[in-house]
Amino acid sequence: MNVYAVIMAGGAGTRFWPASRSSRPKQLLALAADPNESLLAATVRRLDPLITKENVFIATGAHLSDASANVLPGVPKNQILAEPVPRNTAPCIGWATATIARKDPDAIVCVLPSDHFMANEDGFRKTVAAAIESAKKGYLTTIGIVPTRPETGYGYIEVGKKIDGDTFEVARFVEKPNRERAEEFLKGGKHLWNGGMFFFRAKDMIAEIDTYLPDLADGMRKIDDAARKGEEPKALAEVFPKLPSISIDNGVMEKAKKLAVVQGDFGWSDVGSWESAWELAKKDAAGNAAPAGSIVVEAKNNLVVDLTTGVKTGKNKAIALVGVSDLVVVETDDALLVIPRERAQDVRAAVDALKAAGKKELL
């Protein structure tokens, strides 16, 4: 009962434009296998029965707190932690950990991203259970994903001595490699992808922040003291924007001494682009993922997402693909994106162009 989850649910809404916007980032969209379940809702659901909704905290931006609450009816609203400004993951995790520690000094805290996908949910829960056991022994623990390709877009964790089962000491964290090094990591079998998941006793993380991030520790104490007096909102508004903007990886995990990693192999995806959404979507025999009733003629390996509401016409548009391949087509009421699947990461170029043109209403 003393195991808690902190779900990090911020985001700027750029990688999945035009579906995602600043007020509706990726985690609030249904981008995986279930078209009726947001990534955030799926993240909370798949923790059952390890962690009940009563022990789930959501760390998000103040402008996203209501939208997050709307997709998580079982999570207490007072456990949605609204950050006044984004300050990276160390302040986010520090504040959430201190909040939980006030409620339960002996808490085990599980920090998870809100926008990932796990194909094998039972396998994921078994890995999380192992990480919790490691945290109970005083290790700052993370989950390392068994790599399936020479990926250059992720950080890696080098595995050290075996502790127990699939749990190992962390030899070191490795920054995103070039292609050659990524291929070496894949062949060597001693490196795992850093999936951004962390498990620890609350008191251990607070102690590590005291050691390695003293400015953050001072700010946390001010917020914590104010919270005990019932004055947290005022202190949060004054203190949080001044906290150092640093990731938990750079600020703590890469420096701490007692580190462990649990090897995970459960069909993980960070759902990082429209290309990932196509990979996870249900497709026809020609590899097309398109709305029911779409007309598809001599077309293959396309992703079509129709998010129009039909407000103007009273019905959705008919969608037809003829003789095209490997495209992403996303339509909303106010925008249309057409981009080659292989360039799905470049959707940010459209967002940058809209910013430059001052079209804030489309962001």
Image: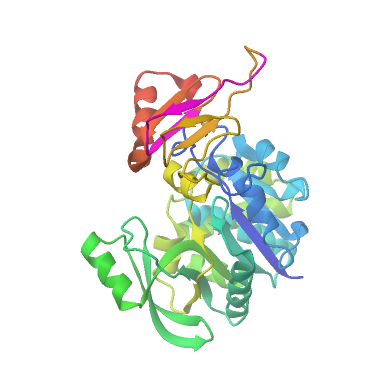
For image coordinates 68% across by 70% down, the residue present is: 107
Seen from the viewer's position, the closer of residues 123 and 2 is: 123
Whether residue 144 is visible:
yes
Q: Is the N terminus in the top left, top right, bottom left or bottom right quadrant?
A: bottom right
Q: Is residue 360 left or right of residue 135?
A: left
341 left or right of 11? Answer: left
Measured as percent of width and height from the top left, residue 42 is found at: 65, 52
Can you say whether 15 is above or below 42 in the image? Answer: above
How is the rendered protein coloured? rainbow
Q: Nearer the viewer, residue 87 or 51?
A: 51
Where does the image place residue 165, in percent across and percent down from the top left? 54, 86
Q: Is residue 1 left or right of residue 301?
A: right
Say whether residue 87 is visible: no
Q: Position of residue 305 (x, y in %)?
A: 53, 33
| Residue at x-position 56% and y-position 22% | 318
Quarter of the image for residue 238 reads top right
* Image location (x, y in percent) of residue 36: 67, 42
Q: Is residue 302 above or below residue 81?
A: above
Residue name at image x 54 percent, y 38 percent:
25
Image height of 304 relative to 163, above or below: above
Count all numbered tags in the image, as a single digit: 0
Q: Residue furthest top?
A: 312
Residue 327 included in the magenta stretch of the image: yes
Q: Residue furthest front?
A: 298
Nearest the viewer among 271 and 305 is 305
Q: Reply yes or no: does residue 244 show up in magenta.
A: no
Q: Residue at x 63, y 66 (%)?
A: 109
The magenta span reads 314-330
Determine whether 147 is above or below 14 in the image. below
Q: Which of 228/81 is in front? A: 81
